[in-house]
Amino acid sequence: MNPPLDIAPFTSWSGGKQPLVIAGPCSAETEDQVLQTVKRMVAASEGISMIRAGVWKPRTRPNSFEGVGAIGLPWVKAAGNAVGLPVTVEVANSGHVELALKNEIDVLWIGARTTVSPFIVQEIADALRGIDIPVMIKNPVNPDLQLWLGAIERFTQIGITKIAAIHRGFSTYEKSTYRNPPMWEIPIELRRRYPQIPIIVDPSHMGGTRDLIYPLSQQAMDMGFDGLMIETHINPDKAWSDAKQQVTPEVLGEILRELVVRQPHLEDNEFHTLHELRAKVDRIDDYIIEMLAERMGISEQIGQFKKDHDLAIHQSERWAAIVKRALANGKTGGLTEDFILKLFQQIHNESIIHQGKVMGK
Ligand code: PEP
Ligand code: MN
């Protein structure tokens, strides 16, 4: 069971707008670059609620630009003041926290490379004891919901009540269209466990290219997530970090105007149709589980047979044949290969557990 969380309403600290749009450069580079970006952003769109900029940049390899450091904090704060918006920066240790607070940064965010490390998350949380500041926690780079939940709980446990999660996708070894594939099932599961925590989607780090920002933002809205964090730069091609995934303030304005934000509440008659469709889905889900339970029962009988005849549980030719049939059937039904393979791997694992139960007796 998840511990109960004391969470302040999102709108009490996010500026009241929904979706919450956080925009600004990946990195603060110069005082003027931050100020011009922010002024142009606000001139080009109405929907911006918060300004972002990184001053300490966690870079994968050394000798790349690692941020301007603390000198950038007053630039970011001044740019926010110039347009009357709160500002947020990434903090990655307790020293950063101290400097950010000293410079009156309004909201802190925890980067994806920090969320993976419980020691550092705890160090940052301890530095915030007794301080009422909103904290946004990016998912860890690896697809591990427990680490994400753990980081969130470390902040709630020391008394932070203004919390949001930022979904920026997960790194994979496999080649992908995305820099960090979304794996939407993970934030969806986070929402199921902690429905009171707002989730902001970061299509810039997820997509890794400008072209993917709009479609990913729309997908995020269609799934009912609460906000967007979009990297914006006055001259994206010349940005000192993440050049490929930043848009100009004017393009940001276009993206936000194009977005269709769907109503969370429907009229009664529309709701009726949705209700019926959901009931159908529920029936199919029940049926799937019933069928799977029946399949596992048969696996146990097979296990008994293998035991009686002294056969190994896993027989690779049989497994290869199962996958082949499933992929062919899946293709006919318009299901992706990746889905079928993952589904059958899970079914196969469960089946081995059931066979093992019988064989171990
Ligand atoms: C960033 O927001 O610029 C950043 C470094 O993001 P992430 O921690 O998601 O990689
Ligand atoms: Mn970035």
Image (cartoon, rainbow, N blue to C red):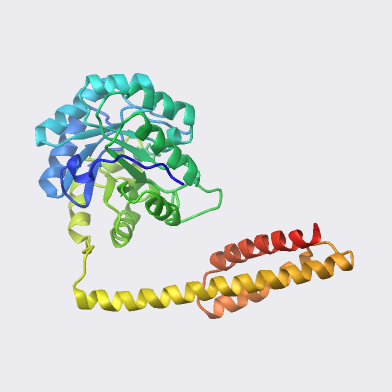
* Residue 243 image point, x, y percent: 34, 41
Picture layout, residue 46 above or below residue 152 = below
* Residue 203 image point, x, y percent: 34, 50
5 and 224: which is toward the camera: 5
Which residue does the image show at 48% across and 36% down from the upper left? 116
Question: Farthest residue toward the bottom?
Answer: 332
* Residue 56 image point, x, y percent: 35, 27
Which residue does the image show at 13% across and 43% down from the upper left? 42
When asked about the image quadrant of residue 216, the answer is bottom left
Which residue does the image show at 85% across and 65% down from the upper left? 307
Picture layout, residue 121 above or below residue 208 = above
Q: Quadrant of the C terminus?
A: bottom right
Drawn side of residue 176 relative to residue 28, left or right: right
Picture layout, residue 28 above or below residue 252 = above
Tell me which image quadrant ligand 2 sits in: top left
Drawn side of residue 140 relative to residue 53, left or right: right
